[in-house]
Image (tube, rainbow, N blue to C red):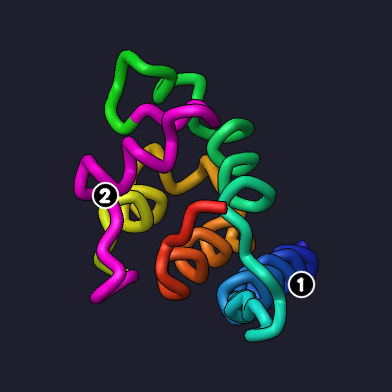
Amino acid sequence: MQKSKFVNLLTILATLLCFVSCEYDTVEFDEVVIPPDQEVSFSNDIVPIFTSNCTQCHDGGVNPDLRASNAYNSLVNGGYINTENPSDSEIYTKLLEGSHSTRASANEKQLILEWITRGANND
């Protein structure tokens, strides 16, 4: 009986030791790189991101207005774009924080940043 309790206790301790000593690897995603020769088009690349992720709220009632016909003017004239320091652009920083951070994928966020970096042109 004593031997059985000892074996059970030893088994429990070994099991706990296994759980405590488990090491979990964290997965870090590689930064999405947009090749320099890849065109980043406002109308073809950026507007669809806003349409699928943002216009539920930013439909004219909440600034910036990100509907396709108004998005460019709303962003540029509203001060949401900073081509001097693209990563400080308000439209980009909003996508990185709070409830906005889950709206767009890493690739979509990178496309927006790349569009701003390349001068935030309207096409």
What kind of element bears circle 2? Answer: loop
Residue plotted at (68% across, 49% down): 44
Q: Mark 1 falls on what kind of element?
A: helix
Magenta-tinted stretch: 65-86
Residue bearing mark 2: 80
Q: Nearer the viewer, mark 2 or mark 1?
A: 2
Task: Give me the C-alpha separation between circle 2 and circle 1.
Answer: 67 Å
Q: Residue furthest bottom?
A: 36
Q: Is residue 84 magenta?
A: yes
For the point 28% across and 28% down, which residue is it?
63
Mark 2 residue type: Tyr
With 108 as the anchor, is 11 left or right in this view? right
Residue type (three-letter) at the residue carrying disc 1:
Val
Label annotation for residue 7: 1
Q: What's the residue at 63%, 85% (across, down)?
A: 36
Sequence order check: which comes first, mark 2 or mark 1? 1
Q: Position of residue 14 (x, y in %)?
A: 69, 76
Considering only vertical position in the picture, is 109 above or below 31? above
Residue extending farthest left: 79
Task: Please name whichever residue, 24 or 114, is drawn nearer the observer in this view of the structure.
Answer: 114
Circle 1 packing at 10 Å, graded few (<14), some (14-19), many (20+), is few
Residue 72 in magenta? yes
Residue 98 visible within the image: yes
Figure quadrant of residue 62: top left
Magenta span: helix, strand or loop, mainly? loop
> Image height check: is 78 above or below 17?
above
- Is 48 left or right of 88, judged from the image as shown? right
Location of residue 29 with respect to 66 vertically, above or below: below
Q: Nearer the viewer, residue 49 or 36?
A: 36
Mark 2, Cα crowd under 10 Å, few <14 / some 14-19 / many 20+, is some
Q: What x and y, as percent, mark residue 19?
A: 64, 70
Q: Quadrant of the N terminus?
A: bottom right
